[in-house]
Each structure stands twice: as C-alpha cells, then as structure tokens.
Image (cartoon, rainbow, N blue to C red):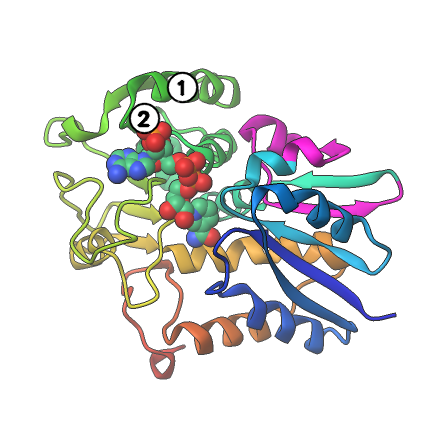
Amino acid sequence: MPRIAYLVGKGVSHSLSPPVYRAAFAAADIDAHYELLDVDEPDLPLAASALRAPDSLGGNVTMPYKCWATEVADDVDETVRACGAANLLVPGPSGLHAHNTDALAIAELLGTVRERISKGTVLLAGAGGAAAACAWALGRVPPRELIIAARRPEAGRALARSAAESSPSTVISVVELATVDTRTTPVDLVINATPLGMLTEDEDPLPSVAFSPSMLLYDLVYRRSGPTAIQIRAAAGGALVVDGIGHLFQQAMPTFRHLTGQEPPHDVMLAALVEVVGRQPALWSADTTRAPSDAD
Ligand SMILES: NC(=O)c1ccc[n+]([C@@H]2O[C@H](COP(=O)([O-])OP(=O)(O)OC[C@H]3O[C@@H](n4cnc5c(N)ncnc54)[C@H](OP(=O)(O)O)[C@@H]3O)[C@@H](O)[C@H]2O)c1
C-alpha cells in the first residue's frame, strides 16, 4: 500500500516541503506521496483522521495549527511539553505522537557552535512558538546570558520563565523589542524568531545590532526571493548565518527520521531544496547569497 505524508496548515500552497520529501522518499525507495492539507479550522477533524489512517506516515503541521497539534496528539515528547507547540504528528500503535522538530533542529545547529555560545550573550527576538523552541534549544548549550526582546513584555516574561527551567544557570532578562540597543551589551548570537523580514526587503527586527565576524545570526525567517535585510547585514559584517531555509532543511532531518524510521538522504534532500529555492541554504555560512552553481 502506498503511504502518504502530509503538511497540515492554512495557505500552504507555496510550501517548499513537497519536492524535498518526494525526492527523499524516492531516494530511500519508500513508496510514499507528500500531500498538502490546506484546511480551515472546522476541517481539522478531517485532517486528524487522515493522519491516523492506515496509509498515513504522519504529517508536518504548520501555522496556525501548531497548538492544535499538541491538543489532538495522544502523546507529546519533551520538546512539545517545553515549547507548547508541535510541528509533527506521527501515528503509532498508541495513537498520534507529537514532536517539535524546530526545537531539535535549533539544538543541533547551536550544538555545532557551542564553544561560541556557552560563555556568551544571546539576544532572542520574539516570544512565540519559534522563540520557545529556541529557548528549549538554548538549554542544551546554555549561554551565560539571554536577553529576550519581545514586542509585548508580558509575553517575553512568560518565555523567560520557561527558559529559566531549560537554562537554570543562565542570566535572563526581558526588553521591549523596539528599544533594543546592543551598543552597551556585546552580543555573541542573535536569533530572530519574529516574522520581521518576511514581508519586505528592508524590514529588520533588530536594526541597532552591528554585526562583526565574532558574531552569529540564526534567523528563522526566509524569503523565496532572497536573503532578508538582517541576513544581508550579518553576512556583510562577517557573521556566520543560519537562515530560514537552512533551518527548514535542518528540521527536515529529524522529521524524516520520525516519519520513516530511516536516516534521511541528506544530499538528495539538499539538492531538491536548492533546486526549488534557487540558492544554497545558509547553515553557519558567511555568504547568504550563494547560487546553486557556487555550491561546494
Ligand atoms: N524556517 C522555518 O522552517 C521556520 C520554522 C518555524 C518558524 N518560522 C518563522 O518564524 C517566525 C515566528 O514563528 P512563530 O511560530 O514563533 O510565530 P508566533 O508564535 O506567531 O510568534 C511570533 C512572535 O513574533 C512577534 N511578532 C509578530 N509580528 C511582529 C511585529 N510586527 N513586530 C514585532 N514582533 C512581532 C509576536 O509578538 P506578539 O506576541 O506580540 O504577536 C511573537 O512574539 C515566522 O515568520 C515563521 O514563519 C520559520
């Protein structure tokens, strides 16, 4: 019986995921399709039935249903408990299991630069689901200091409380996003977990941050048309960057493992993503603009 993997969300018709998973299933010799379930809220029970059906491998869940995914699941893992949101539902003998592969991907990539973070200061913009995934992941490489910059300080303070559970040794403070000024506080890692940068070329979540070669940027946002303003500034300043496309790629690795129980065909998935986006993902790269022909 051919199997189906899904993407459940709203307005997902431009998702980059289908070609990546289709290429991966073909390379791994798995007889499976990848289908988009673009659903309105009243149709979520139908999506849940599809995910639980015998031919289902499971599914990615994206905006605005990442909280719904935690509620419909029969079992949630540690990342989901810590973040309060899930982006993957996988059927098993005891029902639907919820995972947060954003958190796993961020932890994996932060782990590769642990030395640069663990004695340093992290500036985290945003206090929503992606920021919660970052806070959990930061607990794996606890920095000396974490500054949460939120549009609504009360949301920032709520995130600070859960970040303190993941990183008990870290000094955590909350500031208003619009007032961030890093001239007096040197920052080692900047994380953008707001949507700022997604809509227009010049939208910048942290315009006062001046990037230097000793710094890192992890920006969850991606634009199909090219790097965001903060990614361009970070790369120009010599900082190493993970962009939203790099993050998307990284979270596809644990997602594939959970869906299939197999190791992901990394190179095939990367080639499929590069083909659809037209450029290399930034995965701690200093150049965020590389075209496919520049690939190493
Ligand atoms: N590359 C990937 O694969 C990937 C994966 C996950 C997420 N993302 C991206 O990460 C971003 C955040 O996602 P999320 O799931 O965390 O969303 P979310 O739960 O809605 O949280 C968004 C956060 O950004 C803040 N925010 C929204 N608009 C803002 C604005 N105009 N100015 C200042 N702050 C603003 C929100 O503040 P309020 O609470 O005040 O609204 C909230 O703190 C999205 O752009 C999403 O596409 C990308």
| x and y, in percent, of residue 148 in the image | 32, 26
Is 74 covered by the magenta stretch?
yes
The one of 13 and 40 positioned closer to us in this rendering: 40
Q: Check disc 2 and report the residue beneath it.
A: 148
| x and y, in percent, of residue 188 in the image | 27, 38
Q: Quadrant of the C terminus?
A: bottom left
**Amino acid type of the residue that numbered disc 1 sits on in the rendered structure:** Ala
Callout 2: SS: strand
Q: CA distance from mark 1 to mark 2?
A: 7 Å
With 183 as the anchor, is 284 left or right in this view?
right
Is 177 covered by the magenta stretch?
no
Mark 1 Cα shell of 10 Å, populated few (<14), some (14-19), many (≥20)? many
Q: Mark 2 or mark 1, which is nearer the start of the sequence?
A: 2
What residue is drawn where x is 39% and y is 77%? Answer: 295
The image quadrant in which ligand 1 is located? top left
The one of 174 and 52 positioned closer to us in this rendering: 52
Q: Check disc 1 and report the residue beneath it.
A: 160
| x and y, in percent, of residue 230 in the image | 22, 51
Marks counted in the figure total 2
What residue is drawn where x is 50% and y is 42%? Answer: 64
**Amino acid type of the residue that numbered disc 2 sits on in the rendered structure:** Ile
To which quarter of the image does residue 20 belong? bottom right
For label 2, being within 8 Å of ligand 1 is answered no
Q: Residues in magenta? A: 70-93
Cβ atoms under marks 1 and 2 closer than 8 Å: yes
Q: Is residue 235 above or below residue 177?
A: below
What residue is drawn where x is 46% and y is 65%? Answer: 14
| x and y, in percent, of residue 278 in the image | 37, 76
**Residue 173 seen:** yes
Where residue 35 is drawn, which disc sits there?
none
